[in-house]
Image: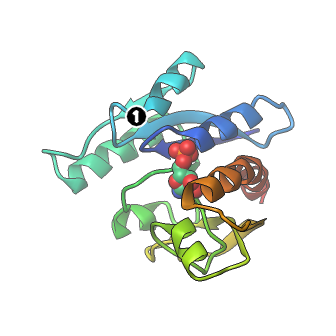
Amino acid sequence: MRKKVAILISGRGSNMMALAEAARDPDCAYEVAIVASDKPDAPGLVWAQQNGIATFALSPKGIGKAAYEAALDAALHEAEAEVIALAGYMRLLSDDFVARWRGRIVNIHPSLLPKYKGLDTHQRAIDAGDAIAGCSVHIVTEELDGGAVLGQVAVPIEPGDTAESLAARVLIEEHRLYPKVLSTFVRR
Ligand code: GRF
């Protein structure tokens, strides 16, 4: 039985697409049960719909975080999701939500954790004079970008790299790493 995964996005959703594409392989250990977003106009939602994936979209604006998360939680259960994969989901999940899904939420982060938690990871790596950047897939806990690392890929920082040029090379690796790590994770 393939594990049913819910993917949460806020934007373009390129990692979500990579996860969904990989799930077309019958050997992939997960299937995408639903793509959910806090941004009803997230471009990734359209792609998911066009590809026959169930979607859920709700903005917390006006209803508050608790009501938003309760509706999200209900939608994920309705879709029978067993694992949540955050993919460019730009909102912090509440401690309560994380506790309800303890050990079953993963995220992709564009740095070699524990370095550069939070935002602007590529610029911070360049400013620090680092020779390598990269990306990490980790378990989501109450601490921002703080849970156990499940897999990482290093990407060399080239002379003259900008945050944009580095981000583009790291993103290619994100798309390779995330499906591999998620498939392994759901098997255990
Ligand atoms: C990626 O860089 C990911 O590492 C970070 O947010 C970005 C999302 O990009 N968490 P996309 O929406 O998957 O294209």
The correct choice, above or below, for 170 with respect to 50 in the image is: below
Q: Nearer the viewer, residue 126 or 67?
A: 126
Q: How many marks?
A: 1
Q: Nearer the viewer, residue 172 or 188?
A: 172
Residue placed furthest toward the left: 62
Question: What kind of element bears circle 1?
Answer: loop
Report which residue position mark 1 lands on: 42
Q: Residue at x 62, y 69 (%)?
A: 111
Kind of residue indicated by mark 1: Ala
Question: Could one spot residue 86 in this view of the protein?
Answer: no
Whether disc 1's CB lies below 8 Å from ligand 1 is answered no
Quarter holding the C terminus is: bottom right
Q: Could you classify mark 1 by the number of other residues whose Cα lies within 10 Å: few (under 14), some (14-19), or many (20 or more)?
A: some
The correct choice, above or below, for 40 with respect to 140 in the image is: above
The correct choice, above or below, for 86 with respect to 43 in the image is: below
Residue 6 position, x and y percent, is 54, 42
Q: Residue at x 75, y 56 (%)?
A: 181
Relative to residue 140, is residue 119 drawn left or right? Answer: left
Relative to residue 185, is residue 14 drawn left or right? Answer: left
Quarter holding the N terminus is: top right
Residue 187 position, x and y percent, is 78, 54
Residue 134 position, x and y percent, is 69, 66
Relative to residue 166, is residue 10 drawn left or right? Answer: left
Query: Please, which colouring scheme is shown?
Result: rainbow
Q: Residue at x 78, y 43 (%)?
A: 29
Residue 153 position, x and y percent, is 77, 64
Q: Nearer the viewer, residue 174 or 149?
A: 174
Residue placed furthest toward the right: 27
Question: Could one spot residue 10 in this view of the protein?
Answer: yes
Q: Residue at x 42, y 44 (%)?
A: 10
